Every structure is written in C-alpha cells, then in structure tokens.
Amino acid sequence: DMGGHDTYMHKEIHEQADAVDRALRGRIDDRFSTVHLGGLNLDARDARAVRRVKILGCGTSYHAGQIGAQMIEELARIPSDAEPASEFRYRNPVVDPDTLYIAVSQSGETYDVLAAVQELKRKGARVLGLVNVVGSAIARETDGGIYVHAGPEVCVVSTKCFTNMVVSFGLLALHLGRIRDLSVADGKRIIEGLRKLPAQISEILANEAEIEKLAGEYADAKSMMFIGRVRGYPVAREASLKLKEVSYIHAEAYPASELKHGPLALIEPAMPTVAIVPDDELLEKNRAALEEIKARSGRILAVAHQVQEKADHTIVVPKNEDELDPILMGIPLQLLAYYTAKAMGRDIDKPRNLAKSVTVE
Ligand code: F6R
C-alpha cells in the first residue's frame, strides 16, 4: 500500500522523520548524556579496549558506513574506516583481536556482507551488526548490534534505511565516545542535535516543490559531478549512486579537494556539479572549489546551510551539529534523484538490472 504516493521511493523518503524518531525512541539517557543500545552486547570494558573500528557493507550501506566511521572517529576518537565487504573478504585482511568489526546491511541477507561476517567469526573477531531486518542472517550471525528501525523498505533503492543507518552510527559514536573521552557537554550537544533531526527532516521535505523544479533544470545532463569534503564526501557518493540507480544518468563523486588533480578537465556547461557545502570548518575551502568550477563555466547546484553566491542554485538545509550534518544534507538529493527519474519516465521502484537484496556473489 503506497498510501497516496506514486512510488515506494516517494513514500519511503517521506517516512524519514518518523523513522528517525523510531531509531531514537527509548535510547537516550539524559542523566549520563549518552544512549542505551540494548542489543550491543559490548560492556564498558570491552568498549574501552577497542583500538580500531572497521565497518563493512555494500552500496548504500557502505556509504552509510563511511559516514559512521567518521562519526566514531570524531566523537569516540577511535581510528575507524569503512570498506566494501566484498573487497575486504578477498584481500586476505589482517584480522585483529583489538578491532571492532561492524557489518551494515538493510536486508541482513547480502551475500558478500554475510560471507565477510562468517570469515571474521571463523578467525575469532568480534563482529556487530547494524541491520534493518530483524532476525535476518547477518543479525543472527553477529555477536550483537543495533537494529536501525527504519521499518520495511520496499523500493529497490535505499533511502530511509540509509538515513536511519547514519543516525544509528551517530548513536553508537555517542555511546562509545561517552565511555571514552567525550565530555558531558559534548554528549548533551549531540543529544540535542539528534532530537532536532525529525523536525528538520520534515522541514527539508516541505521544500519538495522547489527540488522538483530544480530536477527539471538538471535533467538534461548527460553526466553529473558530485563533490564534498570530509563529512560531505560520503554524502556526495551516496547522492551520486542514487541518481545513477533511478535516472540512469551517469554521475561521479569526488572529494572537492581532488578536482584539480584531474576531474576538473571534465567541467563544462554540459556537466553540472552538485556540491555539498556545510557551514563547518571547511566552508571556505568548499567555496574555493565552487569558484574553480565557475571559472570553467560549470553549472553548480549547492546543498548548503546558506545561499552560495558562486552556485547557480542552492538548496538550503537546516543546520545541526557539525558531526550530524551529513544525516540531513543527502535528503534533498534523494528527492532530486526521484524527480529527475520521474521526469524521464523511469521505473523508479524497480530500476533495470537491480535487485533489492543481493544474495549471490
Ligand atoms: C542502493 C542499494 C544497494 C544496497 C546494497 C546493500 O540504493 O539499495 O546499493 O544498499 O545492495 O544492500 P543491504 O543493505 O541490504 O546489504
């Protein structure tokens, strides 16, 4: 039942404020400025002993993991990174007893992720799951974890589950941070930020008509560039994937800082750029990248906290805490992908060549 929406993708994009609310419910502990994650199965002593975090997933879940790794490194000061589960498995990685492994999956059935979990378990590693489908294979095979509580996701491309995964990583980063060196004041600040998310998501979605118009402006592109830096880079990667999947427009994502090392050669009016420009310590650097693109007559659509003069269009999103901004900045770009695909008459809920859950290698 699509409840008045024309596609599940549209419905699921609009369910995100409620979904995030569900991910937060019952988990916040104001007294200690932390969160409770019931199924984590990692006591404080274990959490303190973690020396590294390695996050494994595929596609959109891998992108959620990239944001998650940054959140954990920033808030808990544990060296963290994300890697595609399929690549990890085949490069005979060093499995380290002091590393906490986290498998991320909507379906909980993705073969490459499951096989990576099994290989890690066989070698004695501690593996947590960050999963949407309750009781799925990955949920069962991990030592504990976090359910992301996005609710059923029917559209082949992931939207609300991605958002809830990133929120869940925020909770985990806060939890690990407060066991280690994150102060009470910073814990409070992050909790306040988390609580603001559902209303801010509704605010972004209320801007839908403007995003539909913008999709019309850029739907003629043969190819699009997505750029961002540090916190914004995985947001750019995910937005680029979403556009490809549902519209079949070619898109590339680069760190804005890498443009001058090659991809700037592609910039011309027929190759528009979507730039993630948060109001954080990299704002001036991001603005400089916009200038470089403008100087090559590139069209620019910015997603930012304030109107960007160098951009042809800016989608202004509400500001949260710097660490949590990535949760919000991708949401208008889900709508951009949706409206672009719709204008092109694509089969949005079932893009060609794709399946909802990839249970083969
Ligand atoms: C993208 C998409 C895929 C999945 C990937 C992993 O919109 O849906 O990239 O994210 O196949 O699937 P899960 O999360 O079920 O392991």
Image (cartoon, rainbow, N blue to C red):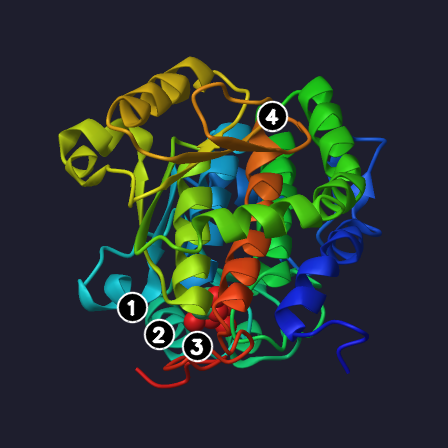
x, y percent for residue 239? 46, 51
- N-term-proximal mark, 1 vs 3: 1
Check if mark 2's residue and mark 1's residue have beta carbons within 8 Å. yes
Instruction: Choose mark 4 or mark 2, whichever is in front.
Output: 4
In the rendered image, which residue does mark 2 sit on? Answer: 112
3D distance between C-alphas at marks 4 and 2 = 37 Å
Q: Is mark 3 within 8 Å of ligand 1?
A: yes
In the rendered image, which residue does mark 1 sit on? Answer: 86
3D distance between C-alphas at marks 1 and 3 = 10 Å
**How many neighbours does mark 4 have within 10 angstroms: few (below 14), some (14-19), or many (20 or more)?**
many
3D distance between C-alphas at marks 1 and 4 = 36 Å
Check if mark 3's residue and mark 2's residue have beta carbons within 8 Å. yes
In the rendered image, which residue does mark 3 sit on? Answer: 110
x, y percent for residue 258? 23, 32
Q: Is mark 2 within 8 Å of ligand 1?
A: no
Check if mark 3's residue and mark 4's residue have beta carbons within 8 Å. no
Q: Could you say which quadrant of the image residue 146 lies in?
A: bottom right
- N-term-proximal mark, 1 vs 4: 1
